[in-house]
Amino acid sequence: MLICVAVGALVIAIPANSSSQKHFLKTYKGTPYEDARYHGSPQKLPGRVECAYYDRGGEGVAYHDADAKNNGSGALNPADGTYLNQFRMDEGVDTSYTKFHDEIDNSPYDLVQPPENQLYVGWTEPGEWFNITVETDHVGLYTADLLYTSNHGGTISLDVNGEPATPPLNIPSTFDAKDPIPWRQWHHWNLAPHLSQVRLPAGKSVLTVHILTEGNMNLAYFDFK
């Protein structure tokens, strides 16, 4: 059950079934991401939640992707032994990173310039999702900002511990007809401030990011405040 409450311009969706959330946490088989460079632990809130550091556990546990191939790491970004080009290249979620050569991700058509070498989840399709384990110091409402690109617009939503935590969240299109380079429509970065508010319990939780409509979005990070 989802209780929706209007607070100014925001709509807050509050999960009402705490027992099912506890059951989800007990049975969830995913684990926080870890590698030689990134030492895995739940991502801390308030703070920045990196989408590319979605949980380990594989297809159907930590994520669902439309195909088993990572179309970014090891494909668009050739496997050359570097951390960024080969980042999670054997997993189905499509990942890449921002590039500042040839005005790819630092073009004059950005609404917000992203950090260089910022990892992100891309090539998104409706029906896809991924989980991120987070940890909060105390229960409360957390406001989420999102760094993203979106060629066609679309909607996403967030779950907390297996329960819907937001209504569909509108992601404005970053398409700009003035850009003469067609492929760069996927690289116009923007920040969606105060995208939503999410009520989180104290301690560990699992956030699920759902791609609902349109796809063609690159999702870099959520800033939870």
Image (cartoon, rainbow, N blue to C red):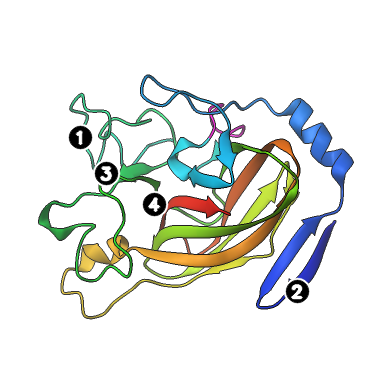
The residue shown at (41%, 26%) is 38
Q: Name the foreground residue: 180 vs 8.
A: 8
Q: Amino acid at mark 2?
A: Ala
In primary-sequence order, the first of circles 4 and 3 is: 3
Q: Which residue is mark 1?
A: 78
Q: Is the C-beta separation of discs 2 and 4 under 8 Å?
A: no
Q: Residue placed farthest to the top in the image?
A: 36
Q: Tell me the magenta residue range.
A: 55-62
Q: How many badges with numbers are in the image?
A: 4
In primary-sequence order, the first of circles 2 and 4 is: 2
In primary-sequence order, the first of circles 3 and 2 is: 2
Rendering coords of residue 98 (x, y %): 27, 49
Q: Find residue 200 and name its label.
A: none
- Mark 3 surroundings within 10 Å by alpha-carbon count, few (fewer than 14), some (14 through 19), many (20 or more): few
* Vertical arrangement, residue 48 with respect to residue 1, above or below: above
User: Disc 4 versus disc 1: distance between alpha carbons?
Assistant: 17 Å
Of badges 2 and 4, nearer the viewer stands: 2
Q: Is the C-beta separation of discs 3 and 2 under 8 Å?
A: no
Rendering coords of residue 50 (x, y %): 46, 43
The residue shown at (56%, 26%) is 57
Q: Amino acid at mark 4?
A: Trp
- Mark 4 surroundings within 10 Å by alpha-carbon count, few (fewer than 14), some (14 through 19), many (20 or more): some
Q: Which residue is mark 3?
A: 117
* Vertical arrangement, residue 184 with respect to residue 137, above or below: below
Of badges 4 and 3, nearer the viewer stands: 3
User: Disc 4 versus disc 3: distance between alpha carbons?
Assistant: 17 Å
In primary-sequence order, the first of circles 3 and 1 is: 1
User: Disc 3 versus disc 2: distance between alpha carbons?
Assistant: 37 Å
Q: Which residue is mark 4?
A: 123
Relative to 171, 205 lies left or right: right
In primary-sequence order, the first of circles 1 and 2 is: 2
As helix, strand or loop, the secondary structure at mark 1 comes to: loop
